[in-house]
Every structure is written in C-alpha cells, then in structure tokens.
Amino acid sequence: MRGDVYPTVIVSDRDLALMNAIEVVFPEATNLLCRFHINKNVKAKCKMLVHPTETWDVVMKAWTTVIDCTDCEAFPKYVENFESFCLAWSIF
C-alpha cells in the first residue's frame, strides 16, 4: 500500500474505540458496520420480542430482503414491507 493512498470505506464491528480511532486516523473514510454483526445484533435484541416464534422467520425474511437489496428503486418498498411486519411490536 502506498503511503499517500488511504481507505475510503472501513467496515468494523462497532467497537467504539476502533470507530473513534478510524475517525481520527482516516477522517475522510466512511465507517460502515459489518453485516454479520448487524444481523447478530438484530437477532439478539429483537428475537425475544417477536411472538409467536413462527413470525420471527417472516420478520427475518423481510429484514434480509432489505439488507440484500441492490435496487435503489425497490429499496423503499422493501423497507416499508419490513416496517409493516414490525408494526405489531411497537418497541421495534
């Protein structure tokens, strides 16, 4: 790696110390969260809120559709669909 070329995007696991260091060392870089860790957090924080458990699969399928979307025009529809599934759980 050349000394005059810096990353424009850095993916991390939301470690606050690392995120702060990235902001200081690479202020122009966009700091994104790792998809694996986002999914892990969604499951850890939300699964216990969804009953019956069969509904959880529907919620996760809608969530996966949102995060897998590569079509900018379809994205708002997928987000709206996910939000409609989650209306039953106001804590979402």
Image: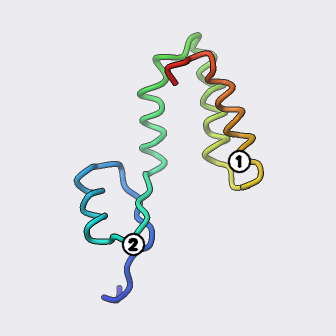
Q: Is residue 5 left or right of residue 92?
A: left
43 to 66, vertically: above or below: above
Identify which residue, 86 or 59, lies in the foreground. 86
Q: Where's the N terminus, which quadrant?
A: bottom left
* Label 2 crowd bin: few (<14), some (14–19), many (20+), radius 10 Å: few
- Name the amino acid, label 2: Glu
| Mark found first going from the N terminus, 1 or 2 | 2
- What's the CA distance linking mark 1 and mark 2? 27 Å
Q: Secondary structure at mark 2?
A: loop
Residue name at image x 40 percent, y 74 percent: 7
In the rendered structure, find residue 16 and report the number of the disc placed on it: none
| The image quarter in which residue 37 lies | top left
Q: Secondary structure at mark 1?
A: helix
Residue 89 at what x, y percent from top left?
Answer: 56, 17
Residue denoted by label 2: 28
Front: mark 1 or 2: 2
Residue 87 at what x, y percent from top left?
Answer: 63, 20
Residue name at image x 24 percent, y 62 percent: 21
| The image quarter in which residue 11 lies | bottom left
Residue name at image x 43 percent, y 64 percent: 30
32 to 86, vertically: above or below: below
In the rendered structure, find residue 75 and report the number of the disc placed on it: 1
